[in-house]
């Protein structure tokens, strides 16, 4: 999932789809690339499970899979908590006992 979101264009597509479903041509409209290139980006997002698409007639409509994004959000939240704790401990260590007691060197 994170590899798929590592690309600026794919992040822009996801940001658009968070507002609601859209056709491939609607997604491609604001971008400065070919429709084929947009389709390739959407395929990467589909493979990662972030986007789902369905074709009705000649129109392919894409929609976001929010549960997949929630899984990533929860993982990032746990990582943030871990790193904040580690950085707090590092700050305490670097402050040293002199600073903790309020004495000056």
Image (spheres, rainbow, N blue to C red):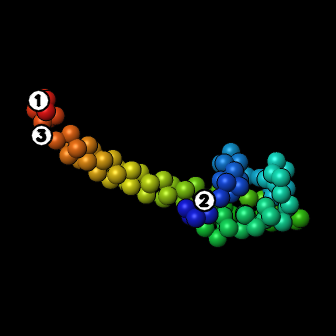
Which is in the foreground here, disc 3 or disc 2? Answer: 3
Callout 1 touching callout 3 (CB < 8 Å): no
Which element carries disc 1, helix, strand or loop?
loop
Along the polypeptide, which appears first: circle 3 or circle 2? 2
Residue under pointer 1: 103
Which element carries disc 3, helix, strand or loop?
helix
Along the polypeptide, which appears first: circle 2 or circle 1? 2
Q: Which picture quadrant has residue 100?
A: top left
**Looking at the image, which is closer to me, 30 or 64?**
30
- What distance separates the C-alpha of mark 1 from that of mark 3? 9 Å
Q: Is residue 14 visible from the viewing direction of this image?
A: no
Determine whether, in the image, residue 55 is placed left or right of residue 95. right
Dividing the image into 4 quarters, which one contains the C terminus? top left
Q: Which picture quadrant has residue 46?
A: bottom right
> Is the residue 102 above or below the residue 45 in the image?
above
**x, y percentage for residue 27?**
79, 53
Q: Residue at x 80, y 64 (%)?
A: 37
Disc marking residue 97: 3
Which is in the foreground here, disc 2 or disc 1? Answer: 1
**x, y percentage for residue 85?**
28, 48
Which element carries disc 2, helix, strand or loop?
helix
Q: Residue at x 67, y 54 (%)?
A: 8
């Amino acid at each position: 999932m994170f590899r798929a979101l590592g690309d600026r264009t794919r992040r822009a597509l996801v940001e658009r789809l968070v507002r609601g479903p859209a056709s491939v041509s609607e997604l491609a409209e604001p971008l400065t690339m070919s429709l084929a290139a947009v389709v390739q980006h959407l395929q990467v997002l589909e493979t990662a499970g972030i986007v789902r698409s369905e074709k009705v007639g000649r129109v392919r409509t894409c929609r976001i899979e929010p549960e997949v994004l929630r899984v990533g959000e929860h993982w990032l939240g746990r990582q943030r908590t871990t790193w904040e704790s580690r950085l707090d401990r590092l700050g305490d260590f670097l402050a040293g006992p002199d600073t903790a007691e309020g004495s000056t060197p």
